[in-house]
Amino acid sequence: MSIDTNAPYKVPKEYEPKNKDFVPKTKPTSVFMIILGGILISAITIAGILGILIGANITYKSIRDAINQPEETEYNESVNRA
């Protein structure tokens, strides 16, 4: 028995679909859930990006203000004794 390796694969008759023109239909609730999931994922992504930007801005301002302020030293009697 020789096998032709250049021939395309042919599906056995028992595994072929009975109705080849069948197109599954999506229920309206499934479509709603898909759309809602997309909206939620988009909203969470946008909120995360905005949170990172705002947090970085606040952190930058606080670091900049801390660097620009003169150092405050408290002098008390125990330190200044000669």
Image: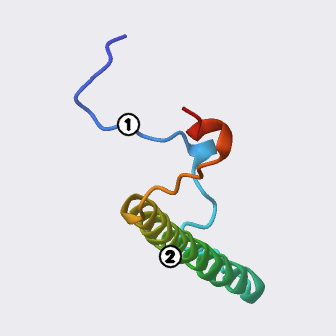
Q: What residue is pinned by disc 2?
A: 50
69 shown above or below 15: below
Query: In this view, which residue lies farthest toward the front?
Result: 82
18 shown above or below 58: above
Residue at 56% x, 69% y is: 48
Q: Could you say where residue 49 lies in the image, as x and y percent from the top left?
A: 48, 70
Residue at 48% x, 66% y is: 62
Q: What residue is pinned by disc 1?
A: 9
Q: Could you say where residue 80 lies in the image, as x and y percent from the top left?
A: 57, 40
Residue type indicated by callout 2:
Leu
Secondary structure state at the residue bearing disc 1:
loop
Residue type indicated by callout 1:
Tyr
Crowd tier of the residue under label 1, counting other residues whose Cα lies within 10 Å: few below 14, some 14–19, many 20 or above:
few
Residue 4 left/right relative to 48: left
Secondary structure state at the residue bearing disc 2:
helix
Q: How was the colour assigned to the protein in this rendering?
A: rainbow
Q: Earlier in the sequence, mark 2 or mark 1?
A: 1
